[in-house]
Image (cartoon, rainbow, N blue to C red):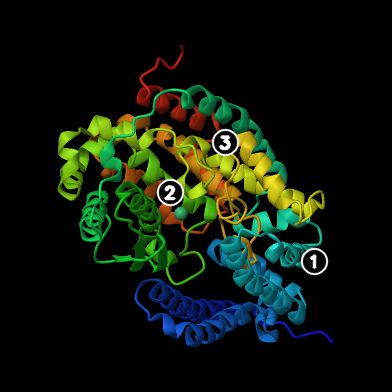
Amino acid sequence: MTVERIPPQAARRQLAELQRRRFALRTAAGAMEFDAATLAAPGNRYARACALAVLNEDRLALTSSAEGIRLMDSLEACAGELDEAEKRELRLLLREGAMQRAVNQEEYCAFRKLAGDIAPAWERAKALNDFSHVEEPLGRLVFAAKRIARQTAPDMPEYDFWLDRHEEGLTAARCEEIFGALRGPLMGLIARFSGLEAPEPGWLHARVPIAAQHRLAHRCMAALGVDADRCRLAVSDRAFTSAFSKYDVRVAACYTPDSFADGLYGVMHECGHALYELGIGSALQFTSLGEGASTGVHECQALFFENQVGRSLAWTRRIWDALTAAVPELLESSPEEFYRAVNALRRTTLRVESDEAAYCLHIMLRFETERALFSGELSARDAPAFWDELSAKYFGLRPKSLAGGILQDSHWTSGEFGYFPAYALGAAGAAQLMEKLGGRSALDCGVGPVCAWLEEHIWRFGAMYPPNALMRRALGGPLDVRYYINYLSDKLSEVYGVDKHA
Ligand SMILES: [Zn+2]
């Protein structure tokens, strides 16, 4: 039976109506999730999960119910009559609902359930340091993820489907090309500098009350020009950012009393995400275009503010008064000493505690493990040994436990594969962006001109262009990881007081 198409004018009106509904459902779910992580009572977990399930189902049904599919098909049929923004909206909506449309409902629910069921097993395996608790469900989850990929995108290699889901257009071959160019130089930098004496002043672990860290975070946000009328800061047990539109962005900070620098750079990172969302063009708001272009572009902005700005000497000098007010122990120190301490290498098997030089190696480890699991070269049973082997190769360290090794990130428990490689693109892209802006001296006149440039070249476009095209235009060419290597090499030479060319 053929379904009658909706005439072009009506289809365009329905597209606008769909975006209005999608915006409302997304805002409601996002606000509940932010509330859950900051203020909501833990006893509300079950009720909230029920409400969120309804909101999310309704949002996905907009493009995958019979009516939604009819609208998508009708819009595709009259694509020639759509303007550029509508064409892009259609493309993003098709991507968003692709799995729901392609995969049989029962199988999709089984996949989600499998992922949900792994979470408690994951926690048990971590607590008991015994991988056997997750081995079997992980194997089944990978098998199911491959089937979902085949059904949704039969023309794509299975792992590429998952990579593309997080970063439109990214493939395993492209990752390997980028990682291939990064791997040797990064390992070389770590080998060269890790033998040198690292600055580790006592104040790095000074006890700084949460309230003082929160005040410092507010002062950093103000110094970055984050608009307090449209962006709020809360405290949570993890740092993250939620944006409902450019008029309501929420940052959650996570503080621990004896490592204030982690809290501070976490806030700088999240401010990068927040500034991006706050800078998206007004005309794109309340549609699929009024969001960041991709995980990679978002991480690029976040890592730009965390590392290129936050860990620079110019910025450290700029916030020195606020820093010493929060951490009186720093009065004995100087911005220069602070700069060296927070840029020194940190040898660890934990991604979240990694230094900048090892960061992309942590990502490669995840990429190589997932790719091997998907290709069938690696079984779930052998995954921990594979992981530990790569950890030894990249960091010269074997994880002491599963919690410090293969079980440290929980993205697989939400059924997400191919999630991390975009982070490496972001890290390398951030260094190239800084170079494009004129290098470190770009910060000499404060962050205002830097933010204005980013808004002009990246932020205001939202999701209007595919991430690769957007970044290529902003950078004036393709991603070139040599900028990242040079940046690290310069900075580490300075931190350890050695001649770069020696
Ligand atoms: Zn981030």
Residue farthest toward the top in the current orientation of the protein: 502
Q: Position of residue 130 (x, y in %)?
A: 66, 60
SS for callout 3: helix
- Check disc 3 and give the amino acid type: Phe
Mark 1–mark 2 Cα distance, whole angstroms, equals 34 Å
Quadrant for the N terminus in the image:
bottom right
Pointer 1: what residue?
Answer: 147
SS for callout 2: helix
Mark 3 or 2, closer to the camera = 3
* Residue ID at (52%, 47%): 350
**Residue 455 in view, yes or no:** yes
Q: Earlier in the sequence, mark 1 or mark 3?
A: 1
**Residue 175 in view, yes or no:** no
- Check disc 1 and give the amino acid type: Arg
* Residue ID at (64%, 69%): 121
SS for callout 1: helix
Q: Which mark is residue 395?
A: 3
Is 431 placed above or below 370 here?
A: above
